[in-house]
Amino acid sequence: MLTHRLALGTALATAVLIVFGGLVTNTGAALAVPDWPDTFGHNLFLYPWSGMVGGIFYEHGHRLLGATVGLLTLALAAALWRRGATLRMLGLVAVLTVVAQGVLGGLRVVLQREDIALIHGPLAQGFLALVVTLAYLTSPAARTPMRVRADGGLRRSTLVAVAVTYAQIVLGALVTHAGWLWLHVGGAVAVFAVVPVVTARARRTGDAVARPLARALLGLLGLQLALGIGAYLARFSPIWIPGEQATILALPVVHRLVGGLLLAAAVVLAVRLNAGSRVFERADRGSGGLGGHLGAPDLIQRASYSALPRPEQPATAERESRV
Ligand code: HEM
């Protein structure tokens, strides 16, 4: 339970970090602090609070939050170390990603290169999806057995939903940093063509985890559409926006966060529904597999839409009695 709480805490801190990253980008505060890893010659943790004004508040605050997420990720990876090979490996990937993010953020400042932000932004969303997935895998929900096994088509389409959503996040970074709007609008059409179909099919499985998750994913998608249109109007049209500057800043910042939450929900849905796939079965055979975290894989294997064992695939109890 401690590991799960740690994963949840890391996910929450990452969400706040993404909001701060958005504030840095959309207020143009990226270069408010010109040096790195120091802040105006001070150690990161010793910079005086009285100096946290204007853009420095966003940029230095973003760095402090980044360090906090880095420390939480180290603690999480340590807690995952003894939880099997797969979780250990995911913990290590999280540590490598957070270190890469810190270096990329620093290089963005030191080299003054906006193109680095194109990698830094989407990688942050991938990191959020990873820690949210870790929060799921360490939760009691992951141990809730699946009653039915999702068919191959649905399982593959969840992976397509993840790929399309991530591509859309990358295209979003191109709007932010290069002003390329129309590819992102085309990407939105692709996301809307794939995700609602996947969520409808996932809901029909009746799975206790996939069903509410699919509903949440669909809700987030609707919210993201509204925020995207709002961000478009705020940035590309002269229209008057209620709340003026505050709303104009909030729209793209929240749109960015919801993009990350959409990706995280799509990844967890894909992990959940692919639990019965060969990848997880194979992982489960090893000592460090995900089986224990994904809820009795023998149950997942036994249950199919027909709820009957296939002739070439005898029920687990039968198999065991033959050994
Ligand atoms: C359908 C799912 C969508 C996802 C997952 C998504 C995701 C994102 C993300 C993550 C960003 C920020 C990228 C970054 O700076 O790193 C972004 C930016 C943006 N998106 Fe979307 N988006 C979606 C739909 C839309 C729609 C329908 C519109 C409407 C035209 C839109 C308009 C924008 C605009 C204008 C920006 C730039 C905001 C800025 O000024 O920074 N998005 N999008």
Image (cartoon, rainbow, N blue to C red):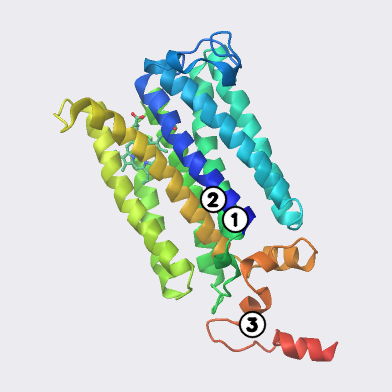
Q: Residue furthest right?
A: 323
For the residue marked with disc 1, what is the amino acid? Answer: His
Residue 183 % position (x, y) = 38, 36
Q: Which residue is the site of mark 1?
A: 4
Residue 312 % position (x, y) = 71, 85
Residue at 63%, 41% in the rendered image? 73
Quadrant of picture, ligand 1: top left
* Above-or-below relation of 9 to 33: below
Q: Which mark is residue 144?
A: none
For the residue marked with disc 3, what is the amino acid? Answer: Arg
Residue at 38%, 30% in the rendered image? 175
* Camera-side mark, 2 or 3: 2
Left or right relative to 303: residue 234: left
Q: Secondary structure at mark 3?
A: helix
**In the image, is the residue at mark 2 within 8 Å of ligand 1 by its beta carbon?**
no
Q: Secondary structure at mark 2?
A: helix
- Any part of residue 205 in sight: yes
Pointers 1 and 2 in contact (CB under 8 A)? yes
Q: CA distance from mark 2 to mark 3?
A: 31 Å
Q: Of label 2 and label 3, which has the lower sequence position?
A: 2
* Above-or-below relation of 249 to 157: above
* Above-or-below relation of 169 to 103: below
Q: CA distance from mark 1 to mark 2?
A: 6 Å
Residue 218 % position (x, y) = 36, 58
Q: CA distance from mark 3 to mark 1?
A: 28 Å
**Dot 3 crowding, Cα within 10 Å, few <14, some 14–19, many 20+:** many
Q: Of label 3 and label 1, which has the lower sequence position?
A: 1
Residue at 44%, 48% in the rendered image? 261
Left or right relative to 129: residue 252: left
Residue 146 % position (x, y) = 56, 75
Q: Which residue is the site of mark 2?
A: 8
Q: Which residue is the site of mark 3?
A: 302
